[in-house]
Amino acid sequence: MDDEIHRRIQDLIQQEQRLREIGAEDSEQAEARAADLARLEEQLDQSWDLLRQRRAKRKAGDDPEDARVRPVDEVEGYRQ
């Protein structure tokens, strides 16, 4: 499962990089691109959080399969 999460993270990073490389020709495109980037960043944060949960559960002797994707507003509220 951790490998799947890592692949998902890598895929999201590649998508994010492609979007950042694309230039927006007008404000409508820029807004759409910004919304797509925000969505990707949220998904990345959720994926990293899930991976951290799984590692913490494994380290504590708990079942990492009990880890769940948390809502964006919960994950985004964490302090780094």
Image (cartoon, rainbow, N blue to C red):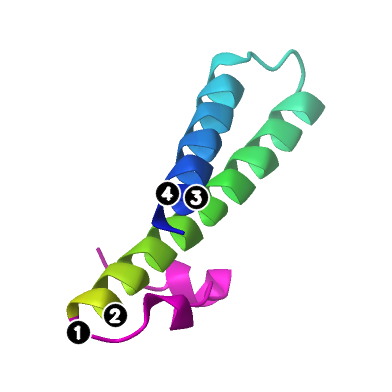
> Separation of disc 2 and disc 4 at Cα?
16 Å
Residue 28, located in which quarter of the rendered image?
top right
- SS of the residue at dot 3? helix
Q: At 29% from the left edge and 80% from the top edge, which residue is drawn?
A: 57
Rounded to the nearest angstrom, the CA distance separating label 1 from label 4 is 20 Å
* SS at circle 2: helix
- x, y percentage for residue 7? 48, 41
Tell me, yes or no, whether the two marked residues, 2 and 4, touch with CB atoms within 8 Å: no
Q: Disc 4 designates what residue?
A: 3
Identify residue type, mark 1: Ala
Q: Which residue is mark 1?
A: 60
Mark positioned earlier in the residue sequence (1 or 3): 3
Q: Residue at x 57, y 75 (%)?
A: 71
Is 79 in the magenta?
yes
CA gap between label 3 and label 2 equals 17 Å
Tag 4: amino acid: Asp
Q: Main secondary structure of the magenta part?
A: loop
The kind of residue tagged 2 is Lys
The CA span between labels 3 and 4 is: 4 Å
Task: Calculate the distance from the C-alpha at mark 2 to the C-alpha at mark 1.
Answer: 5 Å
